[in-house]
Image (cartoon, rainbow, N blue to C red):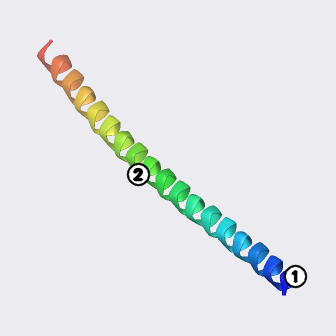
Amino acid sequence: MEKEERVMKVIKIGIVLVSVFCITMLIGRQAAFSQEMSNYELEQEIKALKEKIEGTSDLSDRIT
């Protein structure tokens, strides 16, 4: 009986460790995905600002 209890305890610990590892991997992936999306949004805003700046310089060239 004692050997079976030790085996079950080891299996339970293994299951807990694997579960914790999987949860941390999922959280890490979600964080990376969120960061990637915010980087994409920032790139889009920078692109829009560059277009506005170029449009403004075109207007100033026309005026002068």
Give the left or right position of residue 11, taking residue 37 as reference: right
| Side of 2 relative to 24 (left or right) | right
Residue placed under numbered mark 1 in the picture: 3
- The reply, left or right, for residue 1 in relation to residue 19 is right
Q: Quadrant of residue 58?
A: top left
Note whether 11 is above or below 61 in the view shown. below
Residue at 68% x, 68% y: name it.
Answer: 18
Q: Position of residue 30 (x, y in %)?
A: 48, 58
Which mark identifies residue 60?
none
Q: Quadrant of the N terminus?
A: bottom right
Closer to the camera in the image, 25 or 57: 25
At mark 2, the secondary structure is helix
Q: Nearer the viewer, residue 3 or 59?
A: 3
- Residues tagged 1 and 2 counted as in contact (Cβ below 8 A): no
The amino acid beneath tag 2 is Met
Residue furthest top as drawn:
64
- Which residue is found at the position 85% from the left and 82% from the top? 2
> Quarter-wise, where is residue 23 in the image?
bottom right
Q: Residue at x 62, y 69 (%)?
A: 19
Along the line of sight, which residue is nearer the eye, 10 or 27? 10
Q: Tag 1: residue type?
A: Lys
**Does 58 appear above or below 19?**
above
Q: Quadrant of residue 13?
A: bottom right
Q: How many marks?
A: 2
Which residue is under mark 2?
Answer: 37
User: Residue at (23%, 32%) from the top-left corner?
Assistant: 52
The kind of secondary structure element at disc 1 is: helix
Q: Position of residue 24 (x, y in %)?
A: 57, 58
Image quarter where the C terminus lies is: top left
The answer to which of marks 1 and 2 sits earlier in the sequence is: 1
